[in-house]
Image (spheres, rainbow, N blue to C red):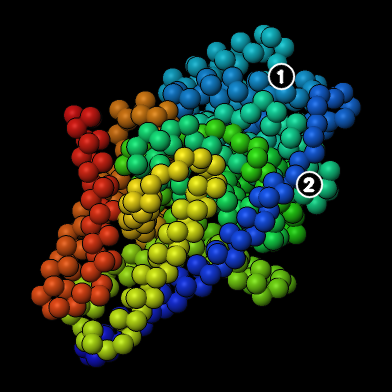
Amino acid sequence: MLAFLSWFAQAIFLVVVLCFALYVLLELRVLLISRRAERRKLAELVQPVGEADDADWPPVSVLLPICNESAVVERLIDAACRLRYPAKALEILVLDDSSDETSGLAQAKVDHYAAQGVSIRLIRRQMRKGYKAGNLVNGIQQAAGEFFAIFDADFVPPEDFLLKTIPCFKDPRLGFLQTGIGYENRDQSFLTRFQAMEMGHQQYVTVGLSEDGDMASLSGSSCVWRRACVEALGGWNASTVTEDVDLGYRAQFGDWKYAYLRDVVSMSVLPDTASAFRVQRERWGRGLIHSAFKHVRQMLAQRMPLMKRAHALAMMFSSLLLAAVYVVLLLTLPLNFLVDFEGPWVQWGALVFYALVALWALDNTFGARKGLRLEDRPSILHTLWETYLYVAMFLPMAWHYFAGGIRALFGVYGDFHRTPKGQGKERGDAPPPINRWLLLGEAFSLGYSLLAIVVAVAKANYVLIPINLTACVGFGMMLYWSWQESRQHG
């Protein structure tokens, strides 16, 4: 029995290492494509435009889905009303699902701009059915535009957003378009910097995916959708908490094209508390893993070259791979008990895993700096230390995605918790109950990793200690930030 458990644990470990190796190699290929594409800056997608007569521009509906966003709703509406576009072809719909003072603030702003002749309305539903997806579906039923520009509550688009994006839709098969995202509070703390680096890397990878014609997972904000595409797909689906990813997958399976304009940048705000971060990432993990399994059969049924299929699988199941990293962490303790580390498999597997992590960390850091357009040149030691902390943070995130995957496995698809906005202005709001369970999981993971280190030292099985040590750093940071957050609440 022990021999079987030993073999089983080693097999899982080696399978995860193999999958991670394939993922890293595919990502390196995309980064090389991104570098080539950046030299051209995707200029062929963006046509230089100026102001034009109304007849030259199709009607556009700007959709602003909000729910209890009192800290940012006013600046969102201000930014939407500053968008340059022929007035007769533009309408702004504030889709309000709020149950607090946000509604009053939004209504006052809407009345202010409507009195100035801006075509703007506030739309409320009697029941918040389907969360954001239901809000958007309700909104487009009352929208007149041929295109929908969507901005979440914490976004501030540039004034020329529509002038730069709408001309791309001269291609009738272009169903949707994603633009770049910047982060106002990226340097507020290491937590926000980590998120900005991760998102910057993802945006840089998307440049390569778009250039190569591969499937991509795009954001549901700072984007433009063709109405015909949305209606052909049946709109947003409330059965998943990542309704934007779900709709994007369905569009790409339906042979609609997408474009990614990284040089058109809307500013956003990152979660700046540990509780907001972990709840958001559990929701993302749950939705992304659910969406991957929901659409994998449809993807496999598509006719596509082997390399494009490999990129599609890597993109769709990257969240599951991250969750599997937490399984590797859980395996470290039984492996120390069950495996003779003088044998080659685990030792070589661990060494390959560490080499892959180092390679992946370097390409992530490179992609993040390119994606965020960071111009500073930190010292080598500072870069290495920050890169290590960056890697360490993926272990708590692996736990969040693992928890989300388990909840998706048990059919929890629609448990939606919005992310607090406003750089700490909503810290007085109590986090949802899932935050406590995720926090307890972080504390358990820290204790588990410490125990695994003790056992490894006692048995002189040192090869897996770096995993546990890095986990201690990552989970320790999350617990420290949670302690700071609790002190501020107290």
The residue to which callout 1 is attached is: 119
User: Which of these two is toward me, 297 or 183?
Assistant: 183
In the visual, does 199 lie left or right of 282? right
Vertically, is 60 above or below 465? above
Against 153, residue 274 (above or below) is below
**Quadrant showing the C terminus:** top left
Q: Amino acid at mark 2?
A: Glu
Instruction: Using the numbered discs, state the Cα–Cα distance from disc 1 to disc 2 in whole angstroms.
Output: 32 Å
Q: Residue furthest right?
A: 55
User: What kind of element bears circle 1?
Assistant: loop
For residue 469, side relative to residue 224 (left or right):
left
Type of amino acid at the residue the image marks with label 1: Ser
Residue 217 in view, yes or no? no
- Residue 123 coordinates in the image, percent (x, y): 61, 26
Where 175 sits versus 128, above or below? below
User: Which SS class for mark 2?
Assistant: loop
Query: Circle 2 sits on which residue?
Result: 44
Of marks 1 and 2, which one's residue comes earlier in the chain?
2
The residue shown at (35%, 42%) is 191
Q: Position of residue 108 (x, y in %)?
A: 55, 13
Residue 481 position in % (x across, y down): 26, 41
Q: How many marks?
A: 2
Circles 1 and 2: CB atoms closer than 8 Å: no
Place of residue 40 in the rendered image (x, y in percent of width and height, measured from the top left): 72, 49
The quarter of the image holding the N terminus is bottom left
Please rate how many residues cluster around mark 1, counting C-alpha atoms within 10 Å: few if below 14, some from 14 to 19, many from 20: some
